[in-house]
Amino acid sequence: MIALILLNCLVVITVVVIHYEFLFHLTAVLPKIRVMHRFRIVIGVLVALVAHMIEVWVFAFAYYFMHNSEGWGHLEGSFNGSLMDYSYYSFTSYTTLGFGDITPIGDIRYLTAIESLTGLVLITWTASFLFLEMQRHWQPKE
């Protein structure tokens, strides 16, 4: 049980730090880009999507580790054990889309639950960040 909690915490801390670093550097770089502001927002969205994809893959590798190690549980269903299957499962969990064709069995379920919560928080964080960026530069000039 302690190992499960530690693994889940390690994965969550890793993705939160990744997200923070992407947004922190984006805050510094966006104002320096010499294009119209609307394109800066597009760049911000694309960079945020890259951050989310990296975070999903962190979870996917954690699923890979758990599935291929004894005592962590496994994934079953429409699943052949490829890295794409792990990433697909991770994307559906991260975005809270939900799963149906791949089902977690055993302790791996807890990582699935924490990934959904983490994805919800990080996606909301991104939306708030982008809203503030738009608001900062899209105010009408007096």
Image (cartoon, rainbow, N blue to C red):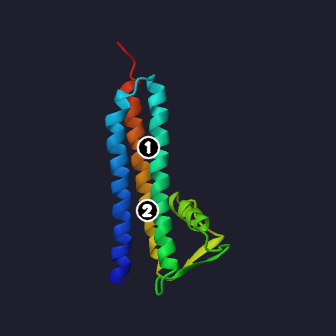
Percent from the top left, x then y, of residue 51? 44, 50
Percent from the top left, x then y, of residue 111? 45, 72
Tag 1: amino acid: Ala
The answer to whether residue 92 is above or below residue 78 is above
Give neighbour class at mark 1: few <14, some 14-19, many 20+ (Cα, 10 Å). Answer: some
Tag 2: amino acid: Leu
Left or right? Give the position of 86 relative to 27: right
The answer to whether residue 108 is above or below residue 84 is below
* Name of the residue lying farthest toward the right: 78
Q: Is mark 1 on a helix, strand or loop?
A: helix
Query: Which residue is disc 2 drawn over?
Result: 117
* Name of the residue lying farthest toward the top: 142
Query: Which residue is disc 1 drawn over?
Result: 127
The quarter in which the C terminus is drawn is top left
Q: Between residue 141 and residue 51, name the one nearer to us.
A: 51
Left or right? Give the position of 71 relative to 102: left
Residue ID at (62%, 72%): 102
The answer to whether residue 85 is above or below residue 46 is below
Give neighbour class at mark 2: few <14, some 14-19, many 20+ (Cα, 10 Å). Answer: some
Percent from the top left, x then y, of residue 138? 41, 24
Which is nearer the N-term, disc 2 or disc 1? 2
Percent from the top left, x then y, of residue 35? 44, 23
Residue ID at (38%, 51%): 19
| Residue contact at pointers 2 and 1, CB within 8 angstroms | no
Q: Between residue 83 and residue 41, name the one nearer to us.
A: 83
Residue ID at (48%, 77%): 66
Q: Is mark 2 on a helix, strand or loop?
A: helix
- The numbered disc on residue 139 is none
Residue ID at (60%, 64%): 84
The quarter in which the N terminus is drawn is bottom left
Measure how far apart labels 2 and 1 are at the Cα level: 16 Å
The answer to whether residue 46 is above or below residue 85 is above
